Image (cartoon, rainbow, N blue to C red):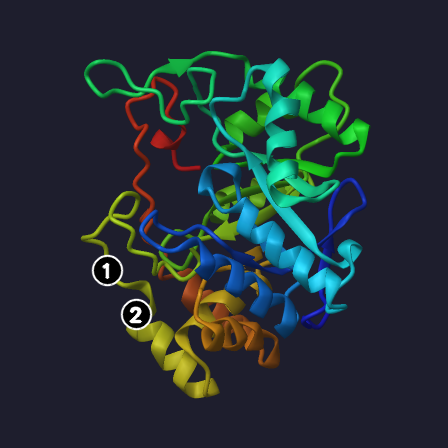
Amino acid sequence: MALTKDSRITLNDGHKIPVVGLGTYAPDEDPKSLVEEAVKVALEVGYRHIDSAFIYGNEVEVGRAINAKIADGTVKREEVFYTSKLWSTYHSPELVRPALEKSLKNLQLDYIDLFLIHIPMEFKPGDDLEPTDENGKLIYHNTDIRDTWKAMEDLKEAGVVKSIGVSNFNHKQIELILNMPGLRYKPVCNQVECHLYLNQSKLLEFCKSHNIVLEAYGVLGSTRDPDWYDQTAPILLEDPVLNSIAKKYGRTPAHVAMRHMLQRGIVVLAKSFKPERIKQNFEVFEFELSEEEIKTLNELNQNRRYVDFKWKDHPKWPFDEEY
């Protein structure tokens, strides 16, 4: 099937996710107005998938942009696929619905299309989003993720979210949910770091075998926020193999990096706050890589993570294994 700007993948609950979305995470020092303008531009260009999260602190601005573009006739609400995420201080089942309602209030929306458990580790419950002890260490909590998932299922049944999924989970954590007694809804997707240097081939295979969509963030490997990203890592978009293929097609390295993921059946989140780059990234549908080129790009994998999570001291840190 040819990929176009209107391409969507049908999720295991029947809803459809656009294959390219705009990511909206930004470092704290970036003005929130940048996010608002980026979402407006993206919707004007043709994006119909916007990804954010409560912890990003920008859902007011994202919602304002979506509602402005609905009001001026650019889009209808049902055409916009919006993703938010449950933060780790709200894993206790009784906190899940109130957490979602905070996002809905910030966004001024009636429902969310996709709601994800942001990370599989829980922090001490409450409104301190990164609770720390006297030594500055994060304070963890131990709600069973399956109990959190049951509360997520309740949200879906209540109609305030259309689909539910997970983010930053490894295959064992997904299996915990898949194998739980009384499971009502499987996760529709797993959103993870995925790019040429971390191509997640095993996790992709696992997810596909369970009809779970893999969704990739960090596809361009280019956000260098010192709070989260390994500053010593090579710059992915400067990779010589990537650049030689881009040159062949008269495309940008970003186009090839994104197209590689799309042709592997992965949903891609591309992040930029520059209007010209937002438009340019959406031109990813105008060319196609050969099977040989996909194979060549697959071989660039180094199992290298750019995202350097702060909670690696958690006893159940999930990334010690290969996938």
Which badge, 1 or 2, comes first in the chain's sequence?
Answer: 1
Residue occupying the point 51% across, 42% down = 203
Q: Secondary structure at mark 2?
A: loop
Q: Amino acid at mark 1?
A: Pro
Amino acid at circle 2? Asp
Could you tell whether 213 is left or right of 35 in the image? right
Left or right side of 74 for 233: left
Tell me which residue sits at (63%, 23%) in the image: 98
Front-most of residues 46 and 120: 46
Residue under the point 51% across and 72% down: 281
Q: Which residue is mark 1?
A: 234
| Quadrant placement of the C terminus | top left
Label 2 Cα crowd, 10 Å radius (few <14 / some 14-19 / many 20+): some
Dot 1 and dot 2 residues touching (CB under 8 Å): yes
Is residue 62 shown left or right of residue 233? Answer: right
Name the spot of residue 1 as percent of width and height, x first: 73, 69
User: Is 131 drawn above or below residue 114 in the view shown?
Assistant: above
Specify the label residue 239 is tagged with. 2
Q: Residue at x 55, y 71 (%)?
A: 291
Question: Is any part of residue 18 visible from this angle?
Answer: no
Work out whether 103 lies above or below 264: above
* Residue 87 seen in the current view: yes
Q: Secondary structure at mark 1?
A: loop
Residue 36 place in picture, x, y as percent: 52, 59
Q: Marks 1 and 2, Cα distance to the nearest angstrom?
A: 8 Å
Task: Relative to 205, say whether 260 is above or below.
Answer: below
Q: Residues within 10 Å of mark 1 (few under 14, many from 20)?
A: some
